[in-house]
Amino acid sequence: MSEIVIVGLNHRTAPVEVRERLAFAADTVGHALRGLRERDGIEEGVILSTCNRVEVCVLSEAGYKGVEHVKDFLAGFHGVPIGELSDHLYHYLGEEAVRHLFRVSSSLDSMVLGEPQILGQVKDAYGYACEFKSIGPVLDKFFTKAFSVAKRVRTETRVANSAVSVSYAAVELAKKILGDLTDKVVMLIGAGEMCELAARHLLSAGAKGILITNRTFERAVHLAEEFEGTAVRFEELATHLKRADIILSSTGSPHFILKRGDVEAVIRIRRNRPMFFIDMAVPRDIDPDANEIDNVYVYDIDDLNNVIETNLEERLREAELAEEIVVAEVAGFRRWLDSQQVTPTIVSLRRKFDEVRQAEVAKALSALGTADPKTRKVVESLASSILNKVLHSPIASLKRETDGRSPMEMVTAVREIFDLPEEEAEGAPEAAERAPEQGGNVGGQ
Amino acid sequence: MHTVLLKVTALFYLVGALAYLHFIFTLNERSAKVGRMLLLIGVLLHGAGFVARYFVAGYTPITSLFESLSFSAFAIVCVFLAFELRYHLRVLGAFVAPLAFAFSVSAAFLPGEVRALAPALNSYWLPVHVILLFFGNAVFAVAFGAAIMYLLMEKELKTKKMGAIFKRLPSLDVLDDINYRCMTIGFPLLTLGIITGSIWAEYAWGSYWSWDPKEVWSLITWLLYAALLHGRMTVGWRGRKAAILAIVGFCSILFTFLGVNLLLPGLHTYTNLSG
């Protein structure tokens, strides 16, 4: 019976040296998906590859055998001995796999809880699978459901609502103080990795422009080219400061480069248009007392870290709510999956008996020799009516909503008793829909 | 009938205010929608009530204390809904809707029957003067709500302790902008209200200005808002300072409107507790 199987590794189970060997580049993923799909026993497949995880999700005929198939595929495709991999790989079957993908898409399994990129990456993986036709009805439904679960988690919990990195916290605060950033100017004083990152985030959040100053003017010019901003001489800082709404500072200066009085003077010139100072330097560049001036906000690195810490705690609390949503959604999807398993069973059950009926009718008709059309018709309808009556109750029990008992058990039993073949017809659910109406006139051909 | 209608709206405003408060605590979008719907229904009924009362009474029914309080609530809800429509500031509802409820519920406890109009009030100036001022006051009430939000938000940003407020309120910039826009709408309304009142006073009492307590307090209110608007235009008073002035200004409005009637008798004493 087909089952959803996920085999993969992530940042917790494998170091980057292993992850990079198993990663699928965008240009090889099509080839990989085709290879995966061609393997025996694998009906559908999707490959998710990010810098933190590589996961292969398949619909496989036989659960544990499917796991081995995928492991073989991973080892074979990347030319890595399977022995080196097995310690790092995890696998999930059936309901566990459903839960896993729902958690991954909702960013509950991410290195940074609630980070937003993963959903896009899962969507890309789904896109590739559609493009290379390695996905079928079950995984299609599975992934689509995963997206809606992720959306639910995003809207119903605050797991991704608050910034958990210094640079994002800076953007979040800037938006709360200054509102729309599109007409705001950033100023970068000194050069520090964190400041540059924050500046980048502010610019991509819409900030209008950037002024860059440095004790070594060449460095400022160089950075200004990189950011497409304007370089300003450090000695002229005071005259240019009034143009900046957000000031990021990280110089190596042993004392304040902006004292409270300097800031007071600037804010007066700006007619109280608010200023947001982000001081990432240790020792600090900006007099913390300036925070007491109206319309001036000064945050140092500790302040930002405190904001992040509070946000992280909130995310952890919200993640618990998110897990509850996932549990409910897994149960819902499981029911759909089960119903999917029943319909193909009914189809093959019917097909099997229909073959018997056709063979027997043919035999009876040839024994009758040249029977008149009326007799032929009687024989045919006799056969189909027996068939329909015999099949009525097993099909009814398969279709019945089973309470407490998994429909899988019933399906397994029926398949075993009637010795039904393992492979399923393409578009099985559709065939099953038609089957009941066919019942009355199958013999009429 | 119309009296019942005017009193019943208090219930809509109460439930509407509760829905907005629920929204600000839970951030459940549906609550904000319910709140808006309730205020909308309430304000339509309220408007219908005033129209009906106008025809029954034969004059603009904003003369007794009952009618004045009730009309204040009506104007506040109208202005709030207009602001919400324009700026999508649903959280503002949690600060403004309770105010509308407070006005309408205090009205509901006052005698509401239609009385004969005092002869001095029988004039075309009555609706002009009163409606201008009440809508001006309503705009300042919204500014008051935004100012409280501003101070709460500013406190969190200054003390760097981001809590529930930080996540729920809009940016300082937006709140300050609301303040400014309210001033630019409310101040002309207030000014015109005072001017029309003065012209009317010339007809009714024979003098443009007679230093009656209500006139004095209106002038004080006007000066406060004039100072705020002037400060903003010339030296860039904004943010905290503007928020505090908006709050002081609104307190002055409340005193002009209620305090003067109840405590300082004068020419304007048409509206007291007995009617």
Image (cartoon, coloured by chain):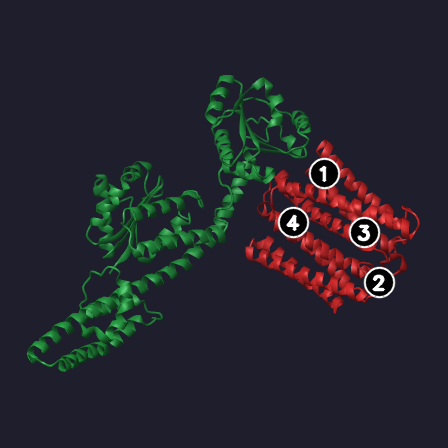
Within 10 angstroms of label 3, few (less than 14), some, or many (20 or more) residues?
Answer: many
Q: In the rendered image, which quarter is residue B3 located in?
A: bottom right
Q: For the point 75% across and 48% down, which residue is it? A: B136
Residue A32: percent from the left, percent from the top?
25, 43
**Element under disc 1:** helix
Q: Where is the C terminus of chain A found, in terms of image quarters?
A: bottom left
Label number found at residue A265: none
- How far apart in space, not on screen, are marks 3 and 4 (Cα)? 23 Å
- How far apart in space, not on screen, are marks 3 and 1 (Cα)? 30 Å
Query: Of marks 1 and 2, which one's residue comes earlier in the chain?
Result: 1
Label number found at residue B129: 3
Q: Amino acid at mark 1?
A: Lys
Q: Which residue is under mark 1? A: B241
Residue B195: percent from the left, percent from the top?
83, 46
- How far apart in space, not on screen, are marks 1 and 2 (Cα)? 38 Å
Which of the pair A136/A311 is nearer the observer?
A: A136
Q: Colour of chain B?
A: red
Is A149 left or right of A158, judged from the image as shown? left
**Element under disc 4:** helix
Residue A331: percent from the left, percent from the top?
38, 61
Q: Mark 4 or mark 1: which is in front? A: 4
Q: Are marks 3 and 4 in contact (CB under 8 Å)?
A: no
- How far apart in space, not on screen, are marks 4 and 1 (Cα)? 22 Å
Query: Of marks 3 and 4, which one's residue comes earlier in the chain?
Result: 4
Q: Amino acid at mark 4?
A: Phe
**Vertical side of A352 occupied by B77: above or below:** above
Query: Of marks 3 and 2, which one's residue comes earlier in the chain?
Result: 3
Query: Of marks 3 and 1, which one's residue comes earlier in the chain?
Result: 3
Q: For the point 25% across and 51% down, which residue is it? A: A67
Shown in green, the chain is A
Q: Mark 3 or mark 2: which is in front? A: 3
Label number found at residue B83: 4
